[in-house]
Amino acid sequence: MLNMRAIDLVLWVIGAWIALGLLGILALHRFALVARVFFPLGAIGGLVLAFAAIRLLGSGMVDTKQLSLGLPQLPFHLRLDALSAFFLLVIGVASFGISLFAAGYFRAGEGTAPGLLCLEFHFFLASMALVLLADDAYAFMVAWESMALTSYFLVTANHRLPKIRAAGFLYLLIAHIGAIAILLCFGVLQANTGDYTFANMRVQNLSTFWASAAFLLAFFGFGAKAGILPLHVWLPEAHPAAPSPVSALMSGVMIKMAIYGLLRVTFDLLHLHIWWWGVVLLVLGLTTAIFGVIFAAVQVEMKRLLAYSSIENIGLLFTAMGLALLFRSYGMNTLAALALTACLYHVLGHALFKSLLFLTTGSVLHATGERNLGRLGGLIRFMPWVAWLALIGILASSGLPPFSGFVSEWLLLQSFLFTPGLPQPFLNMLIPIATASIALTAALAGYAMVKFFGVVFLGQPREEKLSEAHDAGVFEKIGMGWLALLTIGLGLAPNSILHLIDPVTRGLVGVGLAHPASANGWWLLTPTSMVRASYGPLYFLFGVVAAVVIAFVLVRLLYHARLRRSAPWGGGHPWRNSRMQDTAEGYGQPIRQIFEPFFHMDRHLPRPDDNEPEYHVVVTDKFWEGIYMPIARATEYISAKVGKLQQGRISIYLLYSFVTLIVILLLVPTARR
Amino acid sequence: MSRAFSQLISILTPILLAPLLLGWVNQMRAWLSNRRGPGVLQPYRMLHKLFNKDSVMADTASSLFRFAPYAVFGSMLLANAIIPTLSTDLPLASAADAIALVGLFALARIFISLAAMDIGTAFGTLGARREMLVGFLAEPALLTVLFSASLIGQSTALPTIVEAVAHKHFAIYPSLVFAGMAFILVFLAENARVPVDNPATHLELTMIHEAMILEYSGRHLALMEWAASLKLFAYSTLGIALFLPWGIGQKATPSSLLLALPSLALKLALIGIVLALVETFSAKLRIFRVPEFLATAFLLGVIGMLTHILLGA
């Protein structure tokens, strides 16, 4: 079984997931069976997927296959190369943790029936894997649309709430607008040959104009899925609406499929690379990153905060990709490989830590029933497991050494720092500004993450009922623990990950970094040369741990002072309560003040003589009023006009048919002549 | 062997000298305001006293609160260990470059902020919020400063940067002038010095750093205070390494270390005097002027990088 071709192994896993989903229908309401047996089985599928991906990345081969599914004469062309394999690895490792967590998470009687959830969940996984295998536009679109649909149903699992239905609709709408763009992009790429296989697209030589058109369409289409500005609005609505394992899967894994798609189109299918493509990606990516992180810092709902943080990370991924494209267009392939490596590293890192964080919100949600930051607090005392695992997640997410987020940030900054030498002077000027923006984004991410962790887990409980919160169950702990472990491992052993990324960049830009990066030993990451930059996370961790341990032991040995407990100092006030802590709004206040022009704020301040003062501030996105509402109003206006055709009377419709017939009859002879 | 020795020296020097630097600054401040001052050795006495005292901990404190002082102290120690103070021959410096150094400062900041939020008092959360506010502006500013320097050295490894600036032909780099100005502003903000914070006050409306460590006492407070002085030391030596690197030895021989030590002491004494002067002659900013202060630093840093790219120097 294990020595079959990697692509067959992947297909087996996809088949198994589909079968599990179908079994779910048979066991529609048998909650225990679905949760405790089907989901863990699905998790094993994830491991097998990761195994197959790693084996393929190690061998450096390309597997192809044809499946005669669907229409006659139009089989599914499948292909598994290094790029697909790397993203399969992402799906595999993340879904293992998420599926295990889901086994303990879903409760009977919540929204959709458990069997149906099982179906949607596993079909979702299968369609994502199929997107990565697809080697023609037909298979790709089928898989892409199944992915959108299954995830739509998962988002609306709690469809009884109108707010969730609205979020689901918005998601579906933008997903489909994006899908149209992708379809058009494939239409351009096949260059009128009528052959929609990727193999055919690879050999087409498009003119600059058509190549740019294809790039822009792909950017729009995949950007919509990823949540790039200004197509991000669905993301902070849909991700929080979904049940937590689904949010984890969407934020951690699904939006990476868009990254995959864009990489596939720009680096694999298109041969032409024009410098301004890179600039477009870079500028929009940076804007998205800063926008996302600023909004994350002012959110008052924990899952929305994480959703905005995902927008930030998508922005960083696009930035890295833009930089790679820029280098590629000038033939600087080593630097392109460096930027791409940063991008792919972050894809994997973000998939792990963002899934982990979304899962912890799921545990908090189940334990407390609260998702509003203003009603949480102090949970580290009642749910220590979840809290300490979340701490690993936020440290990685803030880009702190020695965790995984830092490595990708470091690689990205390295690729920016060594750019001087681009032929266009103004591009060189762009570099410092971009570098500074990335630094600002990373620091702000730290702010948002401290807010998230501090308000949820630290301090005193803001509600009475929180003291009854219980820690996560066994499955949930294992699922989160797996993701946390990998997050730490990813931070500590960057060179082994670079070995996995090596064949990918080799395939896309012809240069791999694994060899130079490990030239000075496997523990030291030196992407270009030792003199230029090096980073040794194990050394680093050793240094910090040694310092901590020595300090601890010395303090214990030399001094024998004891520890006693007492009430915290209340500043001289006779009483204190948990309401005196900073709220989530309070924590976001400096950001609201500094970045005021970014927000649309609806603020209600109490008057000084108000006996029952009430304060609230609602921060909304300016893009809603600026872009979406005008479009929505225009659409409504036009449909109202068109709607006048619909009278609902049979005689009028017959009249329409009659008029149409006459018009056609008038036209037909003209055409024949 | 000599490399390990050099590394050991560069760890022990900050641990031992950091409180002295702090004492020196405080003494200078006292003299400048016509007070006698407690003497330069006061921080050592303070640490000794605190280590011997029982620690009183809030009954709402979690394990994170107890762990944080050690984490902060450890991060600051490692930060000092990778900055070339006496020689550029540091084995540990290959593990962490300039970006990782900023990461270390951020790690310490996040732990101290989380610990401050852990008790759940108004002071702690207020301090944590303000610290993160200062931090998210100061951190990118510091990075731009370091990038300006690394563009000159074509490296983000601190020893290489120092060698590039110090041991090549003598030149004044315009980009470093801007970076230097930015660095001074960041230095003041990050070490809770006067225009941004006042280390000598416990006025609730103004304090940042003190608000965060208000709940600490005994050995935990001692570690926090020591870590703060280590941070001051790290920033001072970083400033020396980037802008006044002359005298830092290349080889880690005992003789070169001995030669480097007096020049280091002289420069640190000078920094202490300048710091005390700045603190004496400036007034504390309102908290919402602080972002402007730090944005200036950030922009100066960016201008430094731009200057380098424009002028190629």
Image (tube, coloured by chain):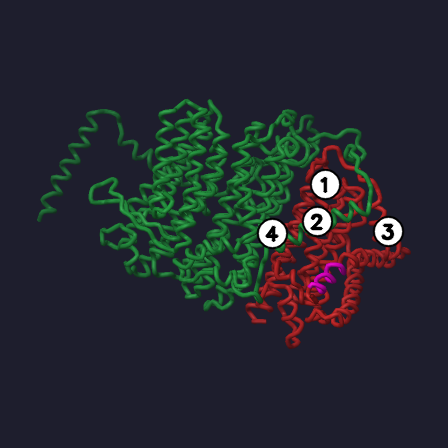
Query: Given this view, does label 3 or label 2 mark the residue nearer the observer?
Result: 2
Amino acid beneath label 2: Val
Q: Which residue is mark 4?
A: A401
Looking at the picture, tell me which residue is in the foreground, A141 or A395: A395
Q: Chain B drawn in what color? A: red
User: Measured from the top left, where is residue A200 in percent x and y?
Assistant: 27, 55
Q: Chain A drawn in what color? A: green
Tag 2–tag 1 contact (CB < 8 Å): no
Q: Which residue is mark 3?
A: B45
Amino acid beneath label 1: Arg
Dot 4 lies on which element? loop
Count residues near mark 2 (Cα–Cα under 10 Å), then give few for <14, some for 14-19, many for 20+: many
Dot 2 lies on which element? helix
- Image quarter where the N terminus of chain B lies is bottom right
Q: Are marks 3 and 2 on the same chain?
A: no
Looking at the picture, tell me which residue is in the foreground, A410 or B210: A410
| Chain under callout 2 | A
* Residue at 58% in and 39% down: A390
Query: Given this view, does label 2 or label 1 mark the residue nearer the observer?
Result: 2
Q: In 3D space, how far apart are the residues under numbered discs 3 and 1 (Cα atoms)?
A: 23 Å
Q: Is residue A59 magenta?
A: no
User: Measured from the top left, where is residue A42 in percent x and y?
Assistant: 42, 35
User: Measured from the top left, where is residue A336 in percent x and y?
Assistant: 45, 61
Amino acid beneath label 3: Arg
Instruction: Please state the extent of the stretch shown in magenta in the rendering.
Output: B4-13
Q: Which residue is mark 1?
A: B66
Q: In 3D space, how far apart are the residues under numbered discs 4 and 2 (Cα atoms)?
A: 16 Å
Q: Which mark is residue A548?
A: 2
- Image quarter where the C terminus of chain B lies is bottom right
